[in-house]
Amino acid sequence: MLKHTLPLLFAAVLVACAAPAERPATQAGPDTATVTHEADCMRVGGEWTQLGRAPVKQCLRQTTDAGKACSDSQQCEGHCIAPEGTVDGAQVGGACSVDTNPFGCQQRVRDGVASTICVD
């Protein structure tokens, strides 16, 4: 039984670790996750730079909705960030991030609940 369950468990872990589905572009412009070329990045007002640990350049864009109240990152161009000092698991309202950088440790709000996420 374990012999047959292990491959299914491994597949489930791989699916769980996969990148989240792209969210639709906000009114201000395309999601930077869809901007994969320097020219496209510049066209949307971004900076083509290395982000995170990967030696690959990506598009970093300042958001136009920074500070807007949110309860989920789908409401923001970047991410919905919890107020400083919030405890993980707390019901909380957040504010939209100032840029689209997903790297580092951030306490994000998803469906009104705060949780710390670290992305290398």
Image (cartoon, rainbow, N blue to C red):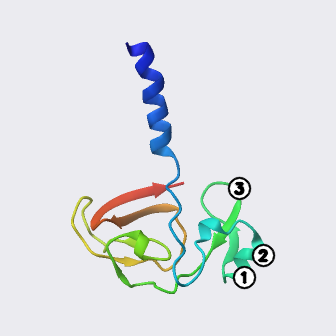
Read off the residue under disc 3. Answer: 55
Alpha-carbon distance for marks 2 and 3?
19 Å
Secondary structure at numbered mark 3: loop
Q: Amino acid at mark 3?
A: Pro
The tag on residue 96 is none
N-terminal label among 2 and 3: 2
Q: Amino acid at mark 1?
A: Arg
Alpha-carbon distance for marks 2 and 1?
6 Å
Look at the image and tell me in which quarter the C terminus lies: bottom right
* 82 and 14: which is toward the camera: 14
The tag on residue 43 is 1
Q: Are marks 1 and 3 in contact (CB under 8 Å)?
A: no
Circle 2 residues within 10 Å: few <14, some 14–19, many ≥20: few
Read off the residue under disc 2. Answer: 39
How far across and how far down the image is residue 44, in percent?
67, 81
How far across and how far down the image is residue 84, in percent?
31, 73
**Which residue is located at x 24 percent, y 63 percent?**
87
